[in-house]
Image: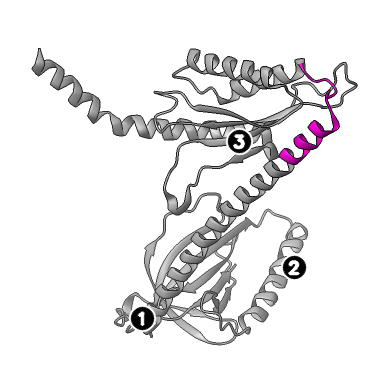
Amino acid sequence: MEHRQYEQRSVAVGDIGGTVDDAKRRQGDERMVLESVYGEDFLDVAQNAWKIWQPLDVILHLKPVRSVSTTSGKIYVSLDLHVKCPKTYPLYGTPLIALENIQGISLRDIDKLKQILDNKAASLKGNEIVLELCQVVQEFLYERNKPPEGSFFDGMLQQHAAVEHERRRQRVRSEQRDREDVVAFQKMHEEKLMWRKAEEGEPTAPVDDSSCETFSCIDGVQRRLTKTNDFRRRPNISPFCREWSAMDCATGHELFITEWTFATTAKTPISSLKPFITHFKQLEKKLKQISRISVTEPTLCSYEMLCVRRNKLTISEINVWQALLRIIFSVSGNTFYGSH
């Protein structure tokens, strides 16, 4: 019997990784739903800085479920529902529930609501429950949406508590933005160092001249390039776009190329192509002006060269395309390349 229990414990330990991954996914989905439903009244206080995942920890500012009631649509009651979940939620365990920034609700009613929420969370164990808890709170607030009663001093205390809570919310948001800025700055610094090391390194050895293709730039310069690799397609990129890398046959510098291809047939009326041709010429002119701009900032890239080709492939087909080239190692630059 002891041996059998040991085997069961081993299996449970082996499933921990899968359990945590499933919990992460479900918590992420629940977070998106809550943010979509409550918008500005949703606050994520989990400190997911430096790409370290933290369990769901949110604050939701809740008001009565209906804005129109016996009080002519005025809202006298509200509170913040603070829900902090364990790592294995919703598979195992229930979240910690706290009621904060309470407006217009007596302590007796708050205790009653807290008990209702705890019982609800226990009955729904194993499921995502935050949205249902919010609905319970909003129904509870609707039933008690009445003008405040009490002394002027009590009202001042509630107002002061509301101001302090808003300051806390703003501080949490500010700290979250600061963490994001630090991460962005570190990433930019690392990229800058990478470019600097690449510029200080030796050029790549010359490539086989037989594999090189000549490209004529619009400023009269000719460049010989050879294709080295196709990049994995980025999401949400235009269907007219294709990305690949190449190498300058003369310098050995590696280039990043974004190629845009447009095609039409002879059956297409010339009049319908005039707007496209006009915009294409305007784009070519603008890019030629941009290519003359000198860029000194190490984190920015300037255009290295511009190239336009116009080729009539057959009697019934015309191919129009243009591309962007960017040197990504020894020289920082972008190249716009196009033909039709």
Residue in view at x 55 percent, y 49 percent: 236
The residue to which callout 3 is attached is 59
Q: Is residue 150 magenta?
A: yes
Mark closest to the chain's N terminus, 2 or 3: 3
Mark closest to the chain's N terminus, 2 or 1: 1
How busy is the neighbourhood of tag 3: few (under 14 within 10 Å), some, or many (20 plus)? Answer: some
Give the quadrant of residue 307: bottom right
Q: Is residue 29 left or right of residue 2?
A: right
Q: Is residue 293 left or right of residue 202?
A: right
How busy is the neighbourhood of tag 1: few (under 14 within 10 Å), some, or many (20 plus)? Answer: some
Q: Secondary structure at mark 1?
A: loop
Of discs 2 and 3, which sits in the foreground? 3
Distance, label 1 to label 3, CA atoms, is 55 Å
Q: Secondary structure at mark 2?
A: helix
x and y, in percent, of residue 107 in the image: 68, 22
Whether residue 182 is visible here, answered yes or no, is yes
x and y, in percent, of residue 147 in the image: 85, 23
Of discs 1 and 3, which sits in the foreground? 3
Q: Are marks 1 and 3 in contact (CB under 8 Å)?
A: no
Of discs 2 and 1, which sits in the foreground? 1
The one nearer the camera, 123 or 314, is 123
| First to last magenta residue range | 144-161
Give the amino acid type for the residue marked by disc 2 in the picture: Thr
Residue in view at x 55 percent, y 75 percent: 300
Q: Is residue 243 left or right of residue 40?
A: left
Distance, label 2 to label 3, CA atoms, is 53 Å
Which numbered marker is on residue 252? 1
Give the amino acid type for the residue marked by disc 3 in the picture: Ile
The residue to which callout 2 is attached is 278
